[in-house]
Each structure stands twice: as C-alpha cells, then as structure tokens.
Image: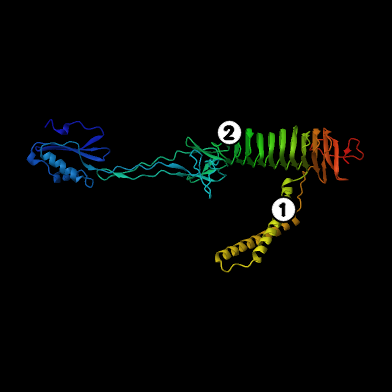
Amino acid sequence: MADSPSKSRIEVGCKVLADYVNDDYSLRLQTCDNDLECRAGITVYNLEKSPSPADIISILRRNNITTTVDLEQVAIFCTEAAQGNNPQEVILARGVEPEPGDDGWFELIVSTGKDVSEWEEDEYGRVDFKAVQSFSNVNVDEHIGNIHPPTAGEAGSTITGELIPPLSGKPADVIAGPGVRFTDDGKQAMATRSGRPVLDNNIISIAEEFVVNGDVDLTIGHITFNGFVDIKGDVLDDFNITATKGIKVSGAIGACKIQCDGPVTIGTMSGKGDGKIICKGTLRTRYLNQVTVECWSDIHVSHEARNAILKSTGSIHIESGQISGGEAIALEGIEVKAAGARSGIRTLLTSGVYFPETDRLKFLRTRIKSVAEQVKRINEALKALNKKPLPANRPALREAIELRIGILTQRHVNLEEEREELNEELINYSAGEHPTARAKINIMSKLYEGAVIHLGEAFEEIKMERSGPMTIVENTDNGSLRYLAYSALATAVIIPEDDPQEETSQ
C-alpha cells in the first residue's frame, strides 16, 4: 500500500479532494484549476472488484459533484481501471469557466484624416483629383465620438455548482485633450472648439491649426478647415483654401481662391485674372498681380499691386510700394507711395465707398439688363413658334413644339417675376450710414498720368504727373479735386478759406 497513488506528488494548482483506499483499489480525487476540474487517479488491486461507473458517480455525489459529471469520461475511466491500466489524471467533471467582459472602447465618428481618401465621382462621372482632404471639420458642441463601457462578462461555476463571478472588461483608455469634453454620463465626446480632430496616444483633442510643411499640391489638395491654416511653402494653381480663423502662406500663391473669416497673410499672389481673396480680417501681402480682393478690413501691400482689384471696407495701404493698373476701392481711405505707371496705364482709386453696396447696385443694374434681354428673345421665339400652324400629320413634331412653347412660357413667367423683384429692390435701394467713411487719398511719392481719382462726385483722370507727399480730397463746391499738404488718413481734413497750400484742379 505504501506505493499507492494516494501518496503520489500532487500537481501544482491542484488539491486533494478525497482519498478512497481499500483492499481492492486506491482512488484519489483532485480539484484543479480553481475547482473547475475534478481529476481522478486509481490503482486497482483486485480487477474483479474494480469500481463501476455507478460506484464512481456515487463517490462524486458524496463530494457534491453532481451536475458537472462527464458520464462518458466516467465510463472510460472505469473500463481502463477494470482492464488493469490504472488511469491517472482523468477529468471526470468540469465546471464552467467565467467569460471575461469586453474592454470598453472609443468610437470616433469623425475623420482625423489618417484614412486613405477615396475618389468620388459627381453626377456626371467626373472626379476632382484635388479633393483629397479626408479629415473632418468640427464645430463647437459637435458630437465627435462615443465611449463604449466595458461589459460585465458571464459568470461561471465550479464542479460543485458554486458561482464564479465574471471579470469585467477594462474601461476605455481615452483621455479628453484640449478642445474636447466628455458628457456627464461619460458616454460621448463633444468638441469645445472648432478645428480638426486628432487622436494620438489615446488622447482625443481638437487642433486649431492645420500646418502644411511644404507646398499645396495634389498630395494636399483643396483645404477647408475650421481653424487656422499655416502653409510653409507655395500654393499651386487651382488649389483653393478656406479657413475660419486665419490663413498664412509663407510662399507664393497661384491662380487660386483664398477665403477666410479671419486675417490673411501671404507672400505673393499671381492670380492670372482668376485668383481671388475673400477675407473678413486684415490682409497683408508683399505683392499682388491680377488678383481680385474683397476684404472686410484693412489691406496692406508692402511692395506692389499690379493689375489687381482691391476692395476694402477699411483702408488700403501701400506706403512703400506702388499700385499700377486695376482698381482700388476703400471706405476709410487709401495711402500709397505711387499710383499709376509711367506707361499711363489706367489705375482707378476710389475712397469713401462701401464696396458691398456698390457691388450689389451694379449687380442689380446688370441683372435687370440681362433679364430684359432674355425676355425679349423669349418673346421673339414664342412669336415665331405661335405664328406657324402646328403640323397635324406629324404628332411627334407637334408634341415637341408644344413642349418647347410650354418651357419658354414658364421661363418667361419666371423672368418677369425676377425682373419685378429686382426693379423693386433697385427702386428702394439706398446707401447705408457709414460713420467711418473717409473720401481721402494720400500719395507719398508719385501720382502718374493715367491714374483716375474718384472721390464723392469728383471723377478725374490725371493728365500730368504729380509729386507727393500730398492728400487728395473732393472739392464739394464744384465736384473737382483738391490737392492738399499731406495729412494722415485718420486726420480730419480742415480746409480754411483761401488756403495758400491748396491746389484745386480745374
């Protein structure tokens, strides 16, 4: 009996549940793996009295092992024992291992731009290969992600039926960085500022800047960003940039459209007649060529504006440079080193005018003229169609003519309604009050022949080169111009009677 298995080494992680030793056999039951298994080993001394499956089941039941018994394994175990094979480490019962819960996770419902952009076709099957921007623009209080909590998992049970509690999953490993807050229930991530979502090292944040370290080309594409765009290189032709908080381009810009709700600072821009800048903040640049600018603040050009159209609700400053060709319109004054060119190129300078109103007035007049011309052509076409009798023997042609008449008639009705609305707006048009309006132009060095000055009712083309510094204002007495000694734009011009420094154009 000294060599019976009841004295054998116990496996690490197992413990003896019971030993049954008699003259016929020696049986040991062990529980292993945190009571999830019942293992049995037997040494039979009398094969004729080897235990039956019923004996083993009865022994297991005395140890509170009932519902988890593996009857097939019990049968195999008893068969092996009866044949004298003395089976060891046979699993006679199994509990149910608990299922751990799933870890929590963060679901980003906006794009950070790390995904590969997919080409999209328009309704005509065309693809814009410049539209490669893949990140999302988010606004304040926009829902940007969901925080999914860990699950509890499923409980298990031991070989005796005792409950084994499950292990819950780990909470989502995500941190709210700058520009992001979690809702009180901890289930949603919300933006607290506009910009670009960034997920880096489990930190979700909103970046207010979009930096391009090189050029804007096909690898970057058009840029639309709710924040500040900083481009270290150039912007190639036909690539557009739209931003809400500001745009800075260190290099040169081609024939592009730049639009911003904030300030814009660029190096140079050669628009080739198609380039356009629309900004609600101050514009600063070194050089503009064939560019149209609509600015709701001041415009500063350090070197030159050539053949450009500059419109400002503030003032236009080219103190150290020249404006030649094109047009400059400002509400609060214009100050340039030189205006025009020795070649006599026409350069129009207008001050004291709020350009959005004048642009709207120009649109109304142009559109009314266009609508009137369209109505005239439709009337002529309808007259010609109604003049000819419809062919009764050609149904298809008759149907086509009737369809054409119907389309033109409806178009005529729509145009007449539009013309009525436009005429009413034009009749009721009146310029607003602009307390900061300043019909004043300062020339620091040269006013060249061919320049045109428009101040109030005065509209005069310069026939002879003039040297500055000088201040030009309207002569309200006769609708001409006054050329005065220089005074800063912000300084009110007071003209005493018989001013010896005043020179009035005749």
Which of the pair 197/358 is nearer the observer?
358
Residue 505 in percent (x, y) is at 87, 40
Location of the N terminus (image quadrant):
top left
CA neighbours of label 2 inside 10 A, class few (<14), some (14 to 19), many (20+): some
Residue extending farthest to the right is: 498
The percent coordinates of residue 236 (x first, y second) are: 60, 36
Q: Name the residue under label 1.
A: 364
91 vs 283, left or right, is left
**Between disc 2 and disc 1, whose residue precedes?**
2
| Residue at 80%, 43% in the rendered image | 454
Q: In which quarter of the image is the C terminus?
A: top right
Residue 315 visible from this viewpoint = no
How far is the residue under mark 2 from the one under mark 1?
A: 40 Å
Secondary structure of the residue carrying tag 1 is helix
Residue placed furthest toward the bottom? 392
Whether residue 210 is visible, yes or no, is yes
Amino acid under disc 2 = Asp
252 above or below 118? above
**Residue type indicated by callout 1:** Leu
Report the front residue among 350 and 376.
376
Q: Name the residue under label 2.
A: 215
Can you tell which quarter of the image residue 60 is in? top left
